[in-house]
Amino acid sequence: MFGLALCLLGWVGLSPVPMLANVIGATEPALKLLISILLGYPLAIVYHKYIRKYDRFRNLYFILTGLDMAYYNFGASMYHNAIPAIVIYMSTKLLGPGKINAILTFAFNMTYLLAGYVVTESEDYDITWTMPHCVLTLKLIALSFDVWDGDKLLKGEQLSENNKKTALTAPPTFLELIGFVYFPACFLVGPIFSFRRYKDFITDQFPLDSSADVYEHLALKRLIQGVFYLAAYQIG
């Protein structure tokens, strides 16, 4: 766990992050965030080379690596991001997929996020647990509507073509849900995508092998673009 290793180095005063942050003129939390985002690349390589062939470990891998990122960036306050996921899992189990569950999910997540903003508010731009929580709020609200749409499909109701693509006829398992929440490639700052897309990814619905060159080219292109924009902004 790279994040945990850096935390341990920080506790004993050997972490290079504070020095690097000072050299490039950034804050330590901002550099930790950047490191975590860039970690998505080696984590993806490890997943495709070693983890993907074991179906039962796929969600677990994303959970552990996402939690590692969360702890590295937010410490003990990382628990805030788990609470709404547990709530939507329990509410879907107890209430079933439907309007009431969607309303409850919307109300709870928006209230929790706004309360977090109030509690963590300061005069500066702080990188706190509310940053990924903003992304998480949108993901979980969308998820509640997707399971509602799936329930409508099972009842024979009509949906738009777009809603059919994301509708879930079965709610996610607990491991699938937590893997979706902590998926390291988007946990911290997005992008946001539907649970259906995550499910398709972990069940090999995408042509990851036959189109590997295309995906690698796109990933490298995005990395170069990101580094260029970051350098342009930092240098001024």
Image (cartoon, helix red, strand yellow):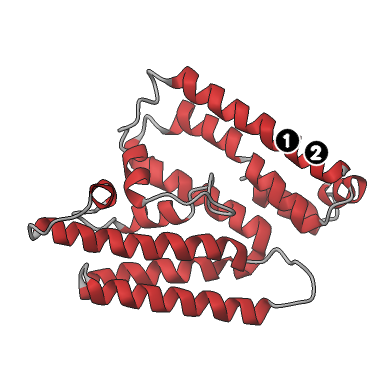
Q: Please indicate, yes or no, whether residue 124 appears anywhere in the rendered image.
A: yes
Res. 94 visible in picture: no
| Quarter of the image that includes the C terminus | top right
Residue corresponding to mark 1: 227
Q: Nearer the viewer, residue 47 or 217?
A: 217
Res 80 quadrant in image: bottom right
Q: Amino acid at mark 1?
A: Val
Q: Amino acid at mark 2?
A: Ala
Q: Residue at x 48, y 80 (%)?
A: 111
Judge whether 29 appears above or below 76 on screen.
above
> Which residue, as the protein is rendered here, is positioned at the far right?
23
Tag 2's secondary structure?
Answer: helix
Decide if residue 105 is on the left or right side of residue 36: left
Considering the numbered disc 1 on the image, is that residue within a helix, a strand or a loop?
helix
Residue receiving disc 2? 231
Discs 2, 1 touching: Cβ within 8 Å: yes
Residue depicted at 61% across the width and 66% down the height = 129
Q: Residue at x 65, y 47 (%)?
A: 36
**Which picture quadrant has residue 87?**
bottom left
* 212 relative to 24, above or below: above
Badge 1 crowding class, 10 Å Cα cut-off, few under 14, some 14 to 19, many 20 or more, is few
**Vertical placement of 208 versus 80: above or below?**
above
Give the position of the N terminus as an image quadrant. Answer: top right
Residue 226 at x, y = what percent? 68, 37
